[in-house]
Structures are given as structure tokens and as C-alpha cells.
Amino acid sequence: MTPALPGRIYRPVLYLMFATLAGDIILTAGFMLLRVPPGGAGVPVNQIALAIGLAALVLSGRSLGDVTGTAAFAPLYGLWVLAAGHLILDVPRHGVWAIRDAANILESGFFVVGFALASDERFRSALTRWLDLVFVCVAFYALLYPFQGQLARFSPTISSMSGYEAPLFFNFVNTSSVALTAVCHILLRKSWPPLVRATLAGLLVMWLIVFVQARITYLQLVLLVALLALFARRELREFAVVTLLAAVFAGLFLLSGIRLPGRLGQTFSLDFLMSHVQAIWGGGGEATRDAAEGVGLRMRWWAEIQGNLSRSPFDWFLGLGYGQPLTSFRGLSDDVVREPHNSYVSIYGRLGVVGITLFLAFLATIATASARLIDLARRSGNRELDAAALTMTCFLGVHVIYAVGEGGMEVSFIAAPFYFFAGAIAAMARRGVEID
């Protein structure tokens, strides 16, 4: 594979991407709201970084034939064509909101940038160092979660296009996904003693269950176990120790008598844990009633979208397009909830059966590339590449699950690193096949 960028501009673009993605992964929603110029309809920093990356590729004069030859490119290109058709029709009617609603597809351009950067042999060592730094920061940053209310007072705030304000720092959105990816990476990297790795990973798992209190965490834990069982049997045994330590830490918290409520306003207990698990499907008791009621609310949103799509074969086949909210629900700040808290339903609603089929095909090709890359790393005996491949695969996997119950792909702090990692995996798997 020919490097897509000449040497003199490769590192500046790589460092720009790594800095941007670190902000997305660690600071999440706060970083996403940064715009130039600040406030109003400024351009978000993620879109600026993407524009610089794509411009560097175009101006370098290098061919992008390698990326167009990957299996993932065909469904992605189909999504771009479909979204472009909607935007041509919808921007004149809805203005900047149409562009905002198309962010998921627009930010898939990070796939091309990630592929181009990962095609260079310098990428692997830089990626390894970056993953070590970012996910260690994620691990310790997540431990501040119980104190976010106090810490956020010291953070500058940023206004969104919808009018609500959010702190730049200590804005713990999507904590379960990034923290579990950190757990995966900590187990895979052997630079720390086993007991230190297991203790930190166990503390993070306990922290997520006791304080973050997100139902999606339980499903993401199942995915992590499945990945380790398939590709990292030794680390799976270590994860058994992590699980035991998490249970011990949770038991010590209960015995301490400390009343430190989590995200749902409830102090952890065994009754709360059982009720919270049942709330995944709308069950559970009084302690998790609000969480369980969210299931019914989402179902009503999804049924409303299906009803709108059923009005005509054209809408069902090609979607409702961009610019109009997919729900009529208003949040606590009286802002309209534009997306139905399920990325797959969002894509289905906006791009129809064709769009969701193309998106699922894209995910399938990336899953295949991930398995191929992990296998190549294992057979080559390259532990650093193996850890990087599994970490990125874990990141993609936990967000595929996260997108079932939240608007994952609709927010750039998830979409940007998701597509970048997908592109990097596709390039490294393709390069590995050629070398092999």
C-alpha cells in the first residue's frame, strides 16, 4: 500500500487527529460543543479537524485507490450518495439543521482519514503510544464520576445550537463505553504488574455498576467477555479475577455504610442491582422506575417514526431525510429531542430501508476486518499490534451496543473516533494481508 500522505505533512495531520479524538473520548459532549468562532452557528472542532484531514489528502495528490478497494467502502459510498441526495433537497428547506442531522454520515469521512493514516508504517507505533496515554487517562478520569456535580462548577460552560449549556470538563457522557474499553486495554497491555492491572480494572467495573448506573453497562460487559473468550483466553482468566475484585470492592462499599448516590440518585445495594438489570427490558422495582419508564418512551418514539415512514413507499424505502426532528418530545430544558435514542432507528428514519441496510453492511465488513487483523496480529506474535487491534475492536463493539439505547452515532464525540478506528482497522487488516 502506498502512503496516502507525504512525510512532511503526515505527522502534523496524525497529531491533529489524535488530539481531536482524545478530546472526544475523554471530554465527550463538552469537547463536541467547541466551535470556531465560539457560540452561535460556529463550526465544530471535529468538523474542522475532518476538513483539514480530507484537504491534506486531496492536496497531497496521492491516489485513494486503496480505500475504495476495501469491502467497507462500497456500503459507505452508498450512504454518502443517499445522504447527499437528501441534503440537496433538505438544506434549502431546513437550513443548518439538515446539516446537523446528517452529522453521522458527514463524520464518516473520518473513515477515509483513519484509513489513509493507518496505511503508513509509522502509524502502528504512534497508535500504540496514543492508546496507552488516552485510555489510562480515561480510567482515572472515570473515577471522578461520583463527584461530577461538585467538579463541574469549576468548569467553563459551552452553549449548544439547541440552547442548552454543558460544562467543558467533567461532562461524563458515555462513561460506560470508554471506561470498559479502558478495562480491555489495561488487561491487554503488559507494562504494569498483573495485580495492578487487575485492581484498577476491577475498581473501574465496580465504579460503573455502583455509580454510573447505566443499564447498557451489563450488555457491554457481556460483549467484553465474548471478545476475550474469542481472541484473548489468557486475559479472560485475568478478567475472572477482575470480576472477583469488583465484587469485593462493591461489598466493601456496602459494608462501609457510605451513602454516595449514583447517576439515578440511588445508593447502590443488591436490591438496586437486581432491579436495575430488570430495567433493561422495562421491569424492575421502584428504585429504577424512571429508568424502566424510559424503555416505554423509546418504544413510542420508534413506533411514531415507523408510522411516519409508512405513509408512503418512497419514505419507507429512502427515509424522511434531514432537518426535521424525528420525535416531538421536549426535554427538561424545553429543547426538542431530535433523535429517538437509538442510532439504528435514527438511520432507518432518515435514510429508510436502503440506508439502514447499507449501514449494517458497513458494520459487518468492519467486524470481518477486525477479526482478520486480530488473527494476523496473533499469528505474527506482535503483542502491541494485538493489544491495539483488540482495544479498537472493543471500542467499536461497546458503541455498537451503546447505539441501541442512546443516540450514539448522532453525536460527533462518538462518531468521529468510531469511524476513524474503523478506517484504521480496515487499512491495517488490508496491509497485513498484503504483507502476509
Image (cartoon, helix red, strand yellow):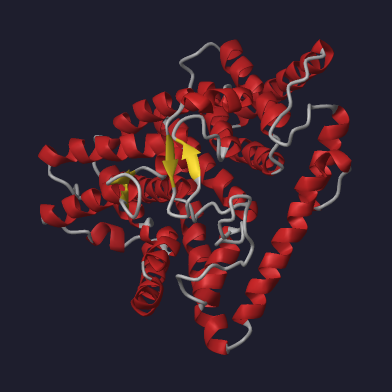
Q: Residue at x 23, y 61 (%)?
A: 65
In this rendering, would 328 be left or right of 156?
A: right
Taking depth in this image into account, of 2 and 417 the one nearest to the observer is 417
In this rendering, would 129 be left or right of 175?
A: left
Choose top left, top right, bottom left or bottom right for residue 274.
Answer: top right
Q: Residue at x 47, y 62 (%)?
A: 362
Which quarter of the image is occupied by the C terminus? top left
Q: Can you give x and y, in whole percent of width and height, for residue 131 in the image?
A: 41, 30
Number of numbered tags placed on the structure image: 0
Q: Residue at x 61, y 66 (%)?
A: 327
Taking depth in this image into account, of 17 and 307 the one nearest to the observer is 307
Q: Is residue 109 above or below residue 382?
A: below
Q: Decide if residue 365 is in sight here.
A: yes
Q: Is residue 235 above or below residue 164?
A: above
Q: Can you give x and y, in whole percent of width and height, for residue 1 in the image?
A: 23, 50
In this rendering, would 12 be left or right of 300?
A: left
Choose top left, top right, bottom left or bottom right for residue 386.
Answer: top left
Q: Decide if residue 376 is in sight here.
A: no
Q: Can you give x and y, in whole percent of width and height, for residue 227 in the image?
A: 60, 40
Choose top left, top right, bottom left or bottom right for residue 134.
Answer: top left
Q: Can you give x and y, in whole percent of width and height, for residue 60 in the image?
A: 12, 52
Taking depth in this image into account, of 365 and 422 the one nearest to the observer is 422
In this rendering, would 374 be left or right of 285?
A: left
